[in-house]
Image (cartoon, helix red, strand yellow):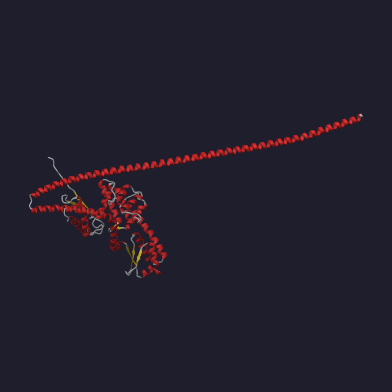
């Protein structure tokens, strides 16, 4: 073999080895890359599995925590409900205990009341027992006397005793019947009063609720009525006054219970008649002007009164009430003049007693405010006047004096008694209420004579212009029970045989005095 062939062989061998090595290296590199990729995939899957495992573990832990939380909340809610129930039961027990405590207190009060009533009954029983012993003693003494009497004398004595017992029982029975009747008397009295008002009020209201307006000719009546009555309807609607047009020549009448509305209507009608222009528009203008004029007159009158009386500090609302008194009357007396008279009398009485004349004059002037009060204030005029005075800032002394001047409430100061006395003096003055002195004296004498005609009456006094009668009885002839029957009989007799405005108060006084001298 030649060297060249050897060299070529060696070269070929080297090339073959080199190619083998090359392909081996290249093959091994692909295997390593695949292994790396496979390792990376395995690692990634391991990471994903570990992440999933971690998440599932967290979810499982959260679910366990949530379940434990729900369990805890349920247990807590259950315990809370039990605590609420326990608190509720405790509250109910406390309420029951409080009710029992109140019941125990009420029972104690009831027991105290019963004990007090029992003590009173015991005292009454002891008193009756003493009275019974006294009666037995008197009867024994009477029997001893009867033993020495004749038959006729004994009969007469027995008759007197029976008569006295019968009177006592009759008086007690009358009182019992009267008490039972009082429960039903209010309804019957209201019906009777309504019937009396319907039957007897016409003659009285005709004088106090009608104003007569003169007209120049009877032709004016047609103009006042207007076409189809439109003028008269407009006038009545605006004034609240009824216009009466009848056959009376040259006059028309205005009828209304409210004197101020009636005065506004009278003034407006006078202006319409003198003007001659009568139609709804003109009527509205004139009525409005008349209302303004009357309001001004009321205000001016009130201001003049307080200036005349020397009173300060009265607010405008009360001044208007004083001005309204100018248009009101009471038992024929002008209410404003009566109030001024009471104010002056109250001041004189206060001066004699060393009291504040300003307070007395103020209370006397305002004492009849309730007679001009609006219809929405309920109660008597004394009560209404006190409400008005209190509403507009008058002192407690003034308010009480107004409320107490008819003895409807208890007086709290001397000024209340002063106003009551001054009001009685003003009302009872002869001539103040359209009554002559002869009729006044005759009426008082009649009242005293009627009351004196009853058996057992010792003396009778008619006071307060005949509005009260005080009957003094002999205590040995009239008992306490018979005194009640006597007051009732006197009142019924006065109702039958006399006529009087308002009411007459009958007071029976029984007083027994026992005097013993120690030597």
Work out whether residue 18 or residue 370 is closer to the camera in this orientation and state it.
Answer: 18
The answer to which image quadrant residue 249 occupies is bottom left
Residue 30 is situated, as x and y percent measured from the top left of the image, at 76, 36
Q: Residue at x 60, y 37 (%)?
A: 57
Q: Does 77 sit left or right of 332 as displayed? A: right
The answer to which image quadrant residue 330 occupies is bottom left
Q: Residue at x 14, y 47 (%)?
A: 136
477 lies above or below 35: below
Q: Residue at x 23, y 57 (%)?
A: 430
Residue 189 is situated, as x and y percent measured from the top left of the image, at 28, 58
339 lies above or below 30: below
125 lies above or below 192: above
The answer to which image quadrant residue 58 occupies is top right
Residue 114 shows in this picture: yes
Q: Quadrant of the C terminus?
A: top left
Residue 501 is situated, as x and y percent measured from the top left of the image, at 25, 58
Work out whether residue 308 or residue 262 is closer to the camera in this orientation and state it.
Answer: 262
Residue 38 is situated, as x and y percent measured from the top left of the image, at 71, 36
């Amino acid at each position: 073999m030649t060297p060249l062939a050897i060299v070529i062989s060696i070269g070929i061998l080297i090339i073959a080895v080199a190619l083998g090595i090359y392909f081996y290296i290249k093959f091994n590199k692909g295997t390593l890359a695949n292994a790396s990729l496979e390792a990376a995939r395995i690692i990634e899957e391991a990471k994903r599995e570990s992440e999933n495992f971690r998440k599932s573990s967290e979810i499982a832990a959260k679910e366990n925590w949530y379940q434990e939380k729900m369990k805890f909340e349920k247990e807590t809610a259950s315990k809370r409900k039990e605590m609420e129930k326990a608190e509720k039961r405790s509250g109910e027990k406390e309420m029951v205990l409080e009710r029992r405590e109140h019941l125990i207190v009420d029972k104690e009060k009831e027991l105290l009341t019963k004990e007090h009533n029992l003590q009173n009954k015991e005292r009454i029983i002891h008193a009756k027992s003493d009275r019974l012993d006294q009666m037995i003693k008197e009867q024994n003494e009477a029997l001893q006397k009867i033993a020495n009497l004749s038959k006729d004398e004994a009969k007469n004595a027995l008759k007197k005793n029976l008569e006295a017992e019968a009177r006592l029982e009759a008086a007690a029975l009358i009182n019992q019947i009267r008490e039972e009747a009082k429960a039903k008397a209010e309804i019957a009295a209201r019906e009777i009063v309504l019937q009396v008002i319907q039957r007897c009020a016409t003659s009285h209201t005709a004088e106090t609720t009608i104003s007569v307006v003169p007209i120049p000719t009877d032709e004016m009546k047609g103009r006042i009525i207007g076409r189809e009555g439109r003028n008269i309807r407009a006038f009545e609607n605006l004034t609240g006054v009824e216009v009466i047009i009848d056959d009376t020549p040259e006059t028309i009448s205005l009828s209304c219970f409210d004197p101020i509305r009636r005065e506004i209507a009278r003034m407006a009608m006078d202006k319409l008649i003198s003007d001659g222009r009568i139609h709804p528009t003109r009527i509205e203008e004139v009525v409005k002007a008349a209302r303004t004029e009357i309001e001004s007159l009321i205000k001016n009158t009130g201001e003049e009164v307080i200036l005349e009386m020397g009173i300060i500090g009265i607010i405008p609302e009360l001044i208007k009430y004083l001005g309204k008194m100018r248009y009101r009357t009471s038992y024929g007396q002008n209410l404003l003049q009566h109030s001024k008279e009471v104010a002056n009398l109250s001041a004189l009485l206060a001066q004699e007693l060393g009291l504040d004349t300003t307070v007395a004059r103020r209370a006397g002037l305002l004492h009849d405010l309730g007679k001009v009060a609006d219809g929405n204030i309920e109660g008597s005029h004394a009560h209404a006047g006190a409400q008005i005075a209190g509403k507009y800032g008058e002192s407690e002394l003034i308010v009480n004096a107004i409320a107490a001047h008819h003895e409807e409430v208890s007086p709290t100061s001397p000024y209340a008694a002063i106003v009551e006395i001054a009001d009685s003096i003003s009302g009872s003055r002869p001539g103040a209420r359209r009554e002559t002195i002869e009729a006044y004296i005759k009426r008082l004498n009649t009242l005293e004579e009627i009351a004196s005609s009853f058996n057992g009456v010792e003396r009778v006094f008619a006071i307060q212009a005949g509005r009260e009668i005080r009957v003094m009885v002999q205590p040995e002839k009239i008992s306490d029970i018979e005194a009640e029957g006597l007051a009732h009989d006197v009142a019924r007799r006065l109702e039958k045989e006399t006529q009087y405005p308002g009411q007459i108060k009958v007071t029976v006084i029984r007083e027994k005095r026992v005097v013993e001298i120690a030597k």
